Image (cartoon, rainbow, N blue to C red):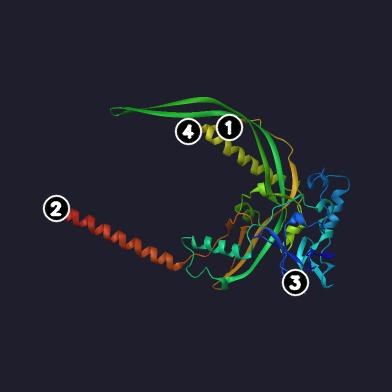
Amino acid sequence: MADSIKCPNCGGNLIFDADQQMMTCEYCLGRFTAEQLKNSVVPDTPADSDAGERIHREGAAEHIREGLGDDGVQFICNACGAQVVADKNTSATFCAFCGSPAIISQRMTDEFSPDYILPFRYGKDQAIKKFFDWCKGGRWTPFDFVSQKNIEKLTGLYVPFWLYNVDSDVDVTGEGVHEESHTVGSTTTVTTSYYKVRRRMNLVWKHIPLDGAQRIDDKLMEAIEPFQFKDLKKFDPAYMQGFFAERYDLTGDDLKGRLIGRLKGYITDELHPTFKQYNKGVKVKKDNTVIFEPKMQYGLLPVWFLHYKYNGKDYNFCMNGQTGEVAGVPPVSRLKRIVLFFIVLAITVAITRLITGLLMGGFVG
């Protein structure tokens, strides 16, 4: 069954209005908070468990493989009775016949049930405004690029993310090098000093996000970080109404290589400021850092995907649905470049003439 959440007043379909942070009914104009809606189409996640633990239980791996293999399955829309066809990873969509939001509850149970959801904060109109503001701030963006007519498709999607909580004991030993130079008359003396350096610290990270969908660009998802996880909520399907949603096809274990790479970068960022007194740097000779087994949970995070067509070419952008951070590469205006070239040329000519005039005036005098 492809379900939707109904209005308690009139039975119409409810949509989550991100701008108002309310569930709204387009028929009776009723407005409700998620807490006021008691009937959820997806059962709550057990309080004493999370997805990271559930995917490791006996038989879970086989269950996940089976679940990821249900390509092209048809579901029945509970609003009009039409068949909804969705690919293997779609867990929230719309009925093509009546337009009702449809949550495919069978695909959000057991290991696939999210622990958390971060609701959209920007609705469609606000998302477009934020995108246009971002485009206008681009130095080389064409003047006519910002236009409603260029928007081909704007999709609000809850992207599946694994959220990692990680502890580490950092223990790094190395050699710091510092150089000083002294000049007396025409003689310069350089003194090089070597120091044994050791850094120990305990670093803890909470909610490091890595997307669990293979077909979504990892670099784009990293570019729209950070998310503000203080607004994270226990999963409630009411927030999905009116948006699309994916479920993961990469488990938290599949992404541990990416996680370790990111953690090493974080550790380096923490260490470097402590090496400032060594002006020639620190060469690490021994690294006994221990990164403990992470605790992972499964959450749905809000992303707007924008397909844009300009001068016959396609451009794709994405936006953090909570913060409005935009990622993507807009076209470069040839006109702006030409204008800048001539401005620089004019300034260069003017400065050259000024300098030449001063020099010639000096010679004449």
Rendered residue at 87%/51% (across/down): 62
The residue to which callout 4 is attached is 280
Task: Give the distance between the C-alpha atoms of the residues marked 1 and 2, in whole angstroms.
Answer: 60 Å
Disc number lying in front (4 or 3): 3
Q: Quadrant of residue 240?
A: bottom right
The amino acid on which the numbered mark 4 sits, given as a three-letter code, is Lys
Cβ–Cβ below 8 Å for labels 1 and 2? no
The amino acid on which the numbered mark 2 sits, given as a three-letter code, is Phe
Marked residue nearer the N-terminal end (1 or 2): 1
The residue to which callout 3 is attached is 99
Using a 10 Å C-alpha cutoff, classify the residue at mark 4 as few (fewer than 14 neighbours), some (14 to 19) or many (20 or more). Answer: some
Q: Is residue 301 visible?
A: yes
Give above or below for 240 relative to 181: below
Marked residue nearer the N-terminal end (3 or 1): 3
Task: Give the distance between the C-alpha atoms of the residues marked 4 and 2, in whole angstroms.
Answer: 48 Å
The residue to which callout 1 is attached is 284
Using a 10 Å C-alpha cutoff, classify the residue at mark 3 as few (fewer than 14 neighbours), some (14 to 19) or many (20 or more). Answer: some
